[in-house]
Image (cartoon, grey):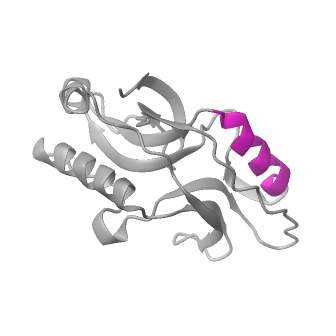
């Protein structure tokens, strides 16, 4: 249920990785995002090139360091997120765009998982690039969008099983490809 993704390479040796909870049925969330946000989306929408996920940690590392970090997660139990509703968060880099997200409850189990993974990555002298601790705000992103003319329906907050994986991350934190499950 942890996923690491690659974005663009900032230099030849380091890549951007993400550890995340990824939906076992990505089409459910991708279809919802496309149906509700496609007409308003700007720059990002959850779809075939972006896997629905809840970020646990994002970081830059070279492949050998990443493998060392991942070896520490063998046997780590996956948790299932609990969704609380949809939220719209103003994009901090623009004046007219908003992020549409599915909010995730900050359960004790999720916060403990986040803390354990963050501390393990930090142990290797690698800093996280996403918010941590009290600033950690778990969510599943649907789109970066304009809100003018928005017409959406609320999703059914049903339980779709998630898996802990790692894979390659994009510049905006999107999950592009799963490399492997963490079991």
Residue beneath the point at 35% across and 39% down: 10
Q: Residue at x 58, y 38 (%)?
A: 161
What stretch of residues is rendered in magenta? 25-38
Q: Position of residue 58 (x, y in %)?
A: 36, 47
Q: Relative to residue 109, is residue 120 drawn left or right?
A: left
- Near-viewer residue (46 or 8): 46
Residue closer to the observer: 139 or 174: 139
User: Where does the N terminus fall, quadrant-wise?
Assistant: top left
Left or right, 34 with respect to 12, comes to: right
Residue 115 in the image: x percent, y percent?
A: 26, 55
Is 26 a magenta residue? yes
Q: Looking at the picture, tell me which residue is in the foreground, 105 or 122.
A: 105
Main secondary structure along the magenta-highlighted residues: helix
Q: Is residue 23 magenta?
A: no
- The residue located at (76%, 55%) in the rendering is 156
What residue occupies the far bottom of the structure in this picture? 95
């Amino acid at each position: 249920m942890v996923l690491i993704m690659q974005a663009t390479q900032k230099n030849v040796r380091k890549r951007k990785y993400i550890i995340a909870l990824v939906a076992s049925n990505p089409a459910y969330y991708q279809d919802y995002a496309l149906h509700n946000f496609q007409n308003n989306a700007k720059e990002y929408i959850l779809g075939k090139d972006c896997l629905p996920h809840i970020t646990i940690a994002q970081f830059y590392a070279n492949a050998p360091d990443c493998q060392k970090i991942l070896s520490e997660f063998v046997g780590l139990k996956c948790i299932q997120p609990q969704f609380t509703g949809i939220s719209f968060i103003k994009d901090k880099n623009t004046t007219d765009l908003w992020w549409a997200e599915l909010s995730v409850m900050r359960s004790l189990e999720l916060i403990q998982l986040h803390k354990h993974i963050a501390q393990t990555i930090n142990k290797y002298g690698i800093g996280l690039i996403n918010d941590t601790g009290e600033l950690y705000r778990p969510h599943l992103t649907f789109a970066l969008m304009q809100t003018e003319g928005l017409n959406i329906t609320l999703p059914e907050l049903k339980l779709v099983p998630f898996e802990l994986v790692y894979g390659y991350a994009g510049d905006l934190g999107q999950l592009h490809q799963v490399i492997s499950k963490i079991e």
